[in-house]
Amino acid sequence: MSQFWKPGTAKPRLLDDEEGGVLFYSASPSSSSTYGFASLESQRHRLPVFKYRTQILYLVETHSTTIIVGETGSGKTTQIPQYLKEAGWADGGRIIACTQPRRLAVQSVAARVAEEMGVKLGEEVGYTIRFEDVTNSEFTRIKFLTDGVLLREMMDDPLLSKYSVIMVDEAHERSVSTDILLGLLKKIQRRRPELRLIIASATIEAKSMAEFFHNRKRRAQLEGEDNKLQIEPAILSVEGRGYNVEMFYVEEPVSDYLQATVSTVMSIHHKEPMGDILVFLTGQDDIDTAVQMITEEAQNNTKSSFGMIVLPLYSGLTRSDQDLIFSPSPRGKRKVVISTNIAETSLTLEGIVYVVDSGFSKQRFYNPITDIENLVVAPISKASARQRAGRAGRIRPGKCYRLYTEDYFINKMSSHGIPEMQRSNLVSSVIQLKALGIDNILGFDWPASPSPESMVRGLEVLYSLGVLDDDAKLTSPVGFQVAELPLDPMISKMIIESDKLGCSEEIITIAAVLSVQSIWISVKGQRELDEAKLRFAASEGDHVTFLNVYGGFLKSNKSSKWCHKNFINYHAMKKVMEVRQQLIRVSQRLGLAIKSCQNDIQVLRKAVTAGFFANACRLEPYSHNGTYKTLRGSQEVYIHPSSVLFRVNPKWVIYHSLVSTDRQYMRNVISIEPSCLREAAPHFYNQQPLNPTHQ
DNA sequence: GAGCACTGC
């Protein structure tokens, strides 16, 4: 126990003290520009909520960009759009747009605003997310949408001309869509000086956001024309209604964070008053282990007068398991939720008073040289740590126990994480920008520029798919069609090719299944799942197996019982149906015919190959353990044991994606004929020997 | 015979 924090000896800290170089803004209609940055020592200027309305309206009136830093519970998300509408920004048919990075947030914020305004959702106030458009083109004045949907809208209306104000919420999360959107909005401002931007961000990112939108060249030019509009972004901070969270740190670094988690939870349980505990760990494995360890400890140890309910939380859980998390704790019981990052932003739990933060999460990293994405356990950022701690202060003052030292937090932890843009494969982003007429991808003004290698790799992949031509322009019609389909470009290419081969009906089903996480239910006893899979298994591989599952699902009349019996995730299948319908709609709009090949496997293989030829692999000659080599990079890879082709090991395969652990595993695999490769991508494979006995 | 942080169009 001694290596961990000791309540009572470790120093408590208030949540507010964490930020260095906090900013303030103090403006009034009479004083024109009196804002700047304050150091930690100087007095903080925060606006109480009641003064908020006039200030925000003043700033939006006088500045082309306003950065707003609102604490949790400040009401910025729901209030600002209403203020803007009252002030006339939605007059004359103009619309106020507000983006969120998540669908659920869009829905709930829109519903709250409609309620506060006393109007029916879908009329004056509406929202748009994928598969769901609850707006009225004539009457909607305030529109909530995901940032991805706004990006899609730009393909038809690049200047977003119907919007007078665009508010980008949760900008500090720096999702790929948010970053692309911010870059494009900065460009739009140049063409539309009257457009107002409001960027809502966490304190820690506000300064860099302001710097990004501060465009000196443009300032000189515009201030000459109209000296009323300030180009330098204003920053406004507003108080929230969250409760203080007291911080505790370990005195010595922790060597085993699972063990530390268990003793911390037990110690809170014995010494602290009632209130639920939320623990942040990295993944399913750690979480299941921790749940087991704590449950065992709790059984051996009855010191406390009340009991504990220990629950895991990660996205792979079924709906009914997740429901347990949200039901209130029974009287006299303390709930302990052991969670992945899902509880950091995506889900909000009520009743949490104590947070235990391991300081780690799983993060995606992309290597443009090998073109492989890896999932790695890595230290979190201060911004994340602060978000995690904030989860303890929602209902009353809370406590946060950090399983790292205070010195580590202050001096070693990075202030914000690496933006997703710099950790991902860029194929989808590059084609999106190309479709919006951004020709110079390498010169694009990104909020955080990805590495040139990643951008070049993205361009290469698109070129090899025939989506970009020699001048790196979108080809017609294939390039434009691929850009229109809301999918990974390799899947889109497969669909477009399927039209020519007359198998689009089947390929669109496969595309829909590939774009949901997994259609199988993950269960502990794997044998039953394997047996269930055998009922659908096709000797050609997983893609054809998906067709069999989908066919069975339709035959059962889309029955949830049938899914349950066959270890198939009913909610995933419902999503497959939705995606499928959308893909059919878009395909028809693009002039593709929806035709069935009556399960002619040979043409299905050709279509898959047309999109995924770059993922072709050959079984090593004389291999006894199923070693494959990728044709492109001679990477050593193996068929994942979850594939129906596991241990079948056909000579030639194409995979959909790679999972990297100690080995590289191919997930979702189909067997092919090598002649298909040269046929599908002569430019790609002409120079390479396809015969294993050659060389 | 092994493993899937989390979003989104």
Image (tube, coloured by chain):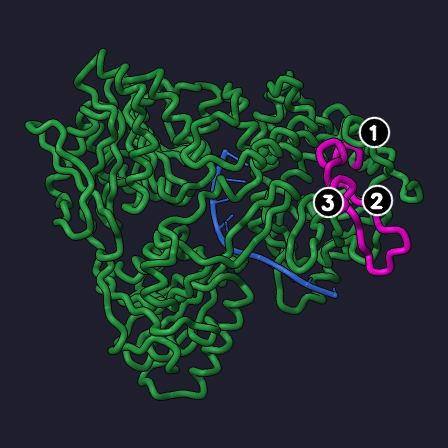
Mark 2 surroundings within 10 Å by alpha-carbon count, few (fewer than 14), some (14 through 19), many (20 or more): some
Q: Position of residue A374 (x, y in %)?
A: 59, 51
Q: Nearer the viewer, mark 3 or mark 1?
A: 1
Query: Vertical placement of A25 versus A260: above or below?
Result: above
Left or right placement of residue A452 versus residue A275 in this view: right
Shown colour of chain A: green
- Precedes in sequence: disc 3 or disc 1: 3
Chain letter of the blue region: B
Residue annotated with mark 3: A655
- CB under 8 Å between discs 3 and 1: no
**Residue at image coords 15%, 45%:** A46
Query: Vertical placement of A656 versus A85: above or below?
Result: below
Q: What is the residue that sits farthest to the top in this orientation?
A: A225
| Count of numbered circles in the view | 3
Asked if labels 3 and 1 share a chain, the reply is yes
Residue annotated with mark 2: A652
Asked if labels 2 and 1 share a chain, the reply is yes
Residue annotated with mark 1: A686
- CB under 8 Å between discs 2 and 3: no
Q: Position of residue A43 (x, y in %)?
A: 12, 49
